[in-house]
């Protein structure tokens, strides 16, 4: 080694330095290809310099180049295979899965459609408010000669004219039913003048002609036209003219003619149990006159007082049984809640419905009177499908005002508490309508169970009244007062009418409790309509006799003195009763 020069030895061992590449700008990021429709958008990345990569050094002098250090191999990146060397990318925000080109296009389309709909609605509102004229006057003549010809038919389609005319005819019909004859006539005259070429106008002309023949404006039911008396026959005795007799007072008025109340068909009659008075003949019994609107059924027998045992109302066709007047027991000492103490009442003779008012009878009342209740309620008509199953059920969902309105229409009254209980207990004061034994029905019967009337023949009183121990509970005409029975105990009250009204509105007495006992009573607010409370009616045919007026008793004359008095004798004054 001493023979060689040091410079050659060193040059031989040192490798030749690699050329340093020139400094260049970082490569531009490659453009991201657009995502295919239906695919999520590419995620956003941010390029960051590597922490372990040193900054580029300054170029050394050309005279003494130094070898560049070897670069350590970088680990392979798994985030994105297309990353360029020297770049580090960080995830800024994940793209939502639904943020696609297709979703954005659908959103733009929906927003556009919504804007078009809003614009269309706005245009329509502006047109109908400012531009549209429902009654154009272009075709109406304005000169005096054309105005003298009368009203001109509106230039509307024929279908709309007929509908408007039919609606006006319906308004006139409703006004006539409500008893507003003048308003109905005014509507009909307006209909004839405005829609003179429509079928409704023809009906209106016929309606306007009926009052001149003593007929109502509208014939809602078969009506007999009163003809003029026939001319006298050539015989010596001419036939009397036909006379139409009204069956009940206070006949309703419709239009400008008075209508007689219709006679509706009577229901089948269930004869009451045989009584000793049923064998009484008509010749032996005293003659009694029923109120107008009721007819007797002599085949059921007569009471010794002369009243028929069964009558039928002309309006509702309901059979009614006779309850003779007498002294009855009301109340029960065993019922300490509401019905104690027991006491005596003296009642006049009356009739009571053989069963509760049915749905058929109540809907007949609604159809004839157009009644809607107080407060207003609605009872829809019975359809043909449910008619057989519903007509015989007791009418429930009625309050006291509804029941009283029906009773007035039928010419009856709501029963007092004493009348209802006496019809169930009879004169022997039995506990149940059939006797003193607990109820024993042929099939199960739960409290407040609603069945067709007279379904349980066991529930029948001595007078032939059904469903007093079950079925629907029933309104009475008496107000409820828990102390009323105690106030009349120990005396016999004649035809009691219940407790006196108090401040505010009191509850009403409801009979036919859950136990089946005839003395049971409950208080219920008269405004309520319940699905287990109905009613029945009574007709009182006798009134209690007025108490006799005491005869004034004259004071005894004093003994006459033999000495004449100078004063004239004064006649004693009679005692005036107070």
Image (tube, rainbow, N blue to C red):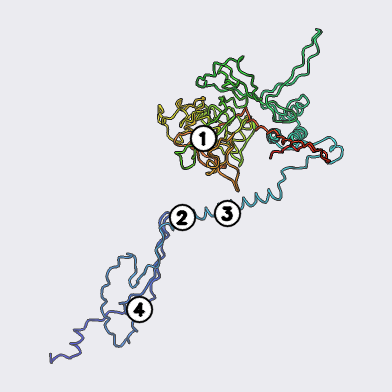
Q: Secondary structure at mark 4?
A: loop
Q: Is residue 366 left or right of residue 145?
A: left
Q: Is residue 96 above or below residue 149?
A: below
Nearer to me, 407 or 436: 436
Residue 347 at what x, y percent from top left? 58, 31
Q: Quadrant of residue 161?
A: top right
Q: Residues within 10 Å of mark 3 (few under 14, many from 20)?
A: few
Pointer 3 or 4: first along the chain: 4
Q: Quadrant of residue 516?
A: top left
Residue 67 at what x, y percent from top left? 26, 82
Q: Which mark is residue 115?
A: 3
Q: Quadrant of residue 413?
A: top right
Please say whether residue 162 is visible from this viewpoint. Answer: no
Check disc 2 and report the residue beneath it. 103
Q: Residues within 10 Å of mark 4 (few under 14, many from 20)?
A: few
Pointer 1 or 2: first along the chain: 2
Q: Residue at x 75, y 17 (%)?
A: 242
Pointer 2 or 3: first along the chain: 2
Q: Is residue 225 above or below residue 332?
A: above
């Amino acid at each position: 080694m001493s023979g060689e020069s040091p410079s050659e030895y060193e040059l031989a061992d040192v490798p030749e330095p690699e050329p340093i590449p020139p400094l260049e700008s970082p490569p531009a990021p490659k453009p991201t290809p657009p995502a295919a429709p239906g695919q999520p958008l590419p995620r956003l990345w941010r390029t960051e310099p590597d922490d372990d990569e040193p900054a580029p050094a300054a170029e050394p002098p050309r005279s003494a180049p130094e070898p560049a250090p070897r670069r350590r191999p970088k680990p392979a990146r798994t985030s994105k295979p297309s990353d360029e060397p020297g770049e580090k990318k960080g995830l800024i925000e994940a793209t939502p899965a639904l943020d696609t080109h297709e979703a954005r296009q659908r959103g733009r389309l929906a927003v556009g459609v919504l804007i078009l709909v809003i614009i269309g609605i706005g245009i329509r509102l502006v047109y109908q408010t400012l531009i549209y004229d429902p009654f154009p006057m272009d075709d109406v003549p304005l000169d005096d000669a054309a105005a003298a010809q009368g009203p001109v038919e509106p230039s509307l389609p024929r279908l709309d004219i007929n509908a408007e005319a039919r609606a006006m005819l319906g308004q006139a019909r409703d006004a006539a039913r409500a008893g507003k004859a003048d308003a109905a006539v005014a509507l009909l005259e307006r209909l004839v003048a405005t829609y003179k070429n429509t079928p409704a106008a023809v009906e209106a002309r016929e309606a306007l002609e009926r009052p001149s023949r003593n007929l109502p404006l509208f014939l809602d039911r078969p009506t007999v036209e009163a003809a003029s008396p026939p001319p006298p026959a050539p015989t010596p005795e001419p036939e009397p003219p036909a006379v139409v007799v009204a069956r009940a007072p206070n006949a309703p008025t419709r239009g400008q003619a008075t209508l007689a109340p219709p006679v509706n068909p009577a229901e089948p009659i269930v004869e009451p149990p045989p009584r000793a008075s049923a064998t009484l003949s008509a010749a032996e019994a005293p003659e009694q006159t029923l109120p107008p609107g009721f007819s007797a059924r002599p085949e059921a027998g007569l009471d010794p007082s002369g009243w028929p045992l069964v009558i039928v109302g002309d309006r509702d066709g309901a059979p009614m049984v006779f309850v003779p007047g007498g002294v009855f027991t009301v109340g029960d000492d065993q019922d300490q809640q509401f019905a104690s103490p027991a006491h005596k009442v003296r009642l006049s003779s009356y009739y009571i419905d053989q069963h509760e008012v049915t749905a058929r009878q109540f809907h007949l009342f609604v159809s004839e009177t157009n009644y809607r209740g107080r407060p207003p309620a609605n009872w829809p008509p019975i359809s043909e499908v449910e008619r057989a199953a519903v007509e015989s059920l007791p009418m429930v969902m009625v309050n006291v005002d509804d029941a009283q309105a029906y009773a007035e229409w039928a010419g009856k009254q709501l029963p007092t508490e004493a009348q209802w209980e006496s019809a169930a207990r009879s004169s022997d004061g039995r506990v149940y309508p059939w006797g003193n034994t607990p109820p024993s029905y042929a099939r199960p019967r739960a409290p407040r169970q609603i069945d067709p009337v007279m379904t349980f023949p066991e529930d029948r009183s001595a007078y032939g009244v059904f469903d007093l121990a079950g079925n629907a509970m029933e309104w009475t005409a008496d107000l409820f007062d828990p102390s009323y029975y105690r106030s009349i105990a120990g005396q016999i009250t004649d035809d009691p009418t219940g407790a006196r009204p108090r401040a505010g509105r009191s509850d009403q007495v409801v009979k036919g409790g859950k136990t089946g006992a005839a003395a049971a009573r409950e208080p219920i607010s008269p405004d309520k309509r319940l699905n287990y409370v109905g009613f029945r009616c009574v007709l009182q045919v006798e009134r209690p006799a007025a108490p006799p007026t005491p005869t004034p008793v004259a004071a005894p004359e004093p003994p006459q003195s033999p000495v004449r008095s100078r004063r004239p004798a004064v006649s004693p004054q009679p005692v005036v009763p107070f």
